[in-house]
Amino acid sequence: MTKEMDRLEPQTEKLKAKMADLQKEMDDKADEGWTVLAELTENMQKIADEVDEKEMRWLELAEEVSVLEEEEAQSM
């Protein structure tokens, strides 16, 4: 579980950086028309959805680890 959590953190950070890059690209290309902005927005939404999934998975794992640690503490 903790290994998966450790992998999720950098993956999430990379995706957030990619979103920031897309936002900058959107700002830079604001004058290029709706089709360009629509495509960039769609890409940004896909990445945001992936970030949400990874963050939710991390939270699920963190909760499981917490429960396991609590059970271990009680059994000692």
Image: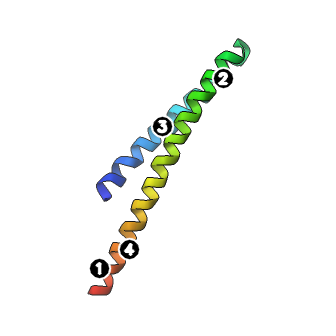
Cβ atoms under marks 2 and 3 closer than 8 Å: no
Residue in the picture at 31% in, 59% down: 1
* Mark 2 residue type: Ala
> Which residue lies at the image location 46% right of the left edge and 42% below the top edge?
13
Mark linked to residue 67: 4
The CA distance from mark 3 to mark 4 is 29 Å
Question: What residue would you read off at disc 1?
Answer: 72
Residue 54 percent coordinates (x, y): 45, 48
Q: Which numbered disc flags the more N-terminal residue, 4 or 2?
A: 2
Q: Residues within 10 Å of mark 4 (few under 14, many from 20)?
A: few
2 or 3: tag closer to the N-terminus: 3
Measured in 3D between alpha carbons, the distance from the residue under mark 3 to the one under mark 1, in whole angstroms, is 35 Å
Please report the residue visible at 72 percent of the width from the left and 14 percent of the height from the top: 33
x%, y% of residue 38? 66, 23
Callout 3, which amino acid?
A: Leu
Asked if labels 2 and 4 touch by Cβ distance under 8 angstroms, the answer is: no
Percent across and percent down for residue 47 are 52, 35
The image's mark for residue 15 is 3
Q: Earlier in the sequence, mark 1 or mark 4?
A: 4
As measured in the structure, the alpha-carbon distance from the residue carrying label 1 to the one carrying label 2 is 51 Å
Question: Tag 3: Cα neighbours inside 10 Å, few (<14), some, or many (≥20)?
Answer: some
Say left or right for 13 vs 41: left
Q: Which mark is residue 18?
A: none
